[in-house]
Amino acid sequence: MAATVVDHEHRVTARELFFDLVFVFAFTQVATLLAGEPTFAGIGRSVLVLAALWWVWSAYAWLTNTVDPEEGVVGAALLAALIAMFVAALAVPGVFDGDGVLFGAAFLVVCAMHSVLYALAGRGNRDLLGAVLRLTPWTLLGAALILAAGFADTARTWLWIAALAITYVAAVLSGSTGWRVYPSHFAERHGLVLIIALGEAFVAIGIGANGTGIGPGEVAAAILGLLVAASFWLAYFDFFSVRGERMLGDAQGPQRIALARDVYTYLHFPMIVGIVLFAFAMKTVVGHVGDELDSVAAFALCGGSALYLLTYSAIRTRVERRLRVSRGRLAAALLLLLLLPIATIVSALAALALVTAVWLALHMYELLWWREARAETRSMLTSS
């Protein structure tokens, strides 16, 4: 058995896209978990599950960035991991009830397979093998704690927190030497998973309309929701996707690895959380356009967009290694947070309209203020 390390830049393959399809369902299941417990505690537990799913997706994104996913053993392992991940996704709505053991067992299988494949790839590369062996014990310990949480009762949430803290912190402490990153493939893969997450918003709009009469209010809510989903997309692909790839390409060695880890593996996660929160809110808004939102749904609607926008300031701060903010996006995020109390006293449709207005105002500002930077970004895209 072998897993061949690639030594050149490459495009995302159809096999990788097929593997990513399971996360369309997994993200939908997280929204279902949150819908079953629409409280702030429920949001916290849903974010924990989403963090576990994101870790798995990120781990395999790093793997297929390094090895050839079309190779026989790798392709077979990806299919097996997809099946195990689908089983884990099936258990997500009941992960903190009776399905925790099933989720934990499937999650452990997926993590173990990833570690074995990476170790196979590193047999001919001492630096890569050393990096894998530094991280693997902590990854498997985190997965084991999630499995143990399925057998626990009162300590279940704390075991989840400990498991994810160990996993995410260990990835930083284990260092950035030995790993490999090919910028174009890595950036493309993360852009595609963002689109997958946005697909959950489309699904949520459709589900919210099920079981209700589709009148003018529901149609208006659907259109506004699609505008916000398009705004999430535009905020990323109009500027950042190209700049991020170039940024990775300009870095070398361990600096590139650390940048890829921090900007993509870690700081893309809040973006995914923001999108899933917005998707959850849209189920309520479309289904109850004339009702007032409760505090949880209002937080998901306004806070999801705010979290997504605040992430760009965090990315800029990490890249420049000093406190820097994206002024327009920071102002829009703060305005969205200020809308929170208003969103609970007006109709759901009106609250969504206010959120949409903030997004549209932000895009108008960026189209005018950043027109030269946008033109430069497009020239970079055409010249690459």
Image (cartoon, rainbow, N blue to C red):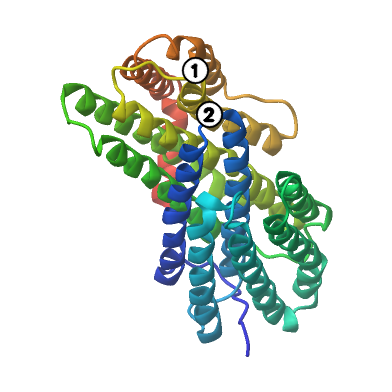
Q: Where 208 sits versus 84, above or below?
A: above
Q: Is residue 220 left or right of residue 89?
A: left
Q: Pointer 2 and pointer 1: residues touching (CB < 8 Å)?
A: yes
Q: Position of residue 10 (x, y in %)?
A: 50, 68
Count of numbered marks: 2
- Return the mark for residue 336: 1
Q: Earlier in the sequence, mark 2 or mark 1?
A: 2
Q: Is residue 327 visible?
A: yes
Label 1 CA crowd tier, 10 Å (few <14, some 14–19, many 20+): many
Q: Residue at x 81, y 57 (%)?
A: 175
Q: Amino acid at mark 2?
A: Leu
Image quarter (top left, top right, bottom left or bottom right) of the N terminus? bottom right
Q: Is residue 81 left or right of residue 199?
A: right
Asked which secondary structure carries label 1, the reply is helix
Label 2 CA crowd tier, 10 Å (few <14, some 14–19, many 20+): many
Q: Position of residue 295 (x, y in %)?
A: 51, 19
Image quarter (top left, top right, bottom left or bottom right) of the C terminus? bottom left
Q: Residue at x 41, y 48 (%)?
A: 195
Q: Where 198 sits versus 310, above or below?
A: below
Q: Where is residue 151, by image quadrant?
A: bottom right
Disc nearest the viewer among 2 and 1: 1
Q: Where 126 sits versus 254, above or below?
A: below
Q: Is residue 276 visible?
A: no
3D distance between C-alphas at marks 2 and 1: 10 Å
Which residue bears the numbered disc 2? 309
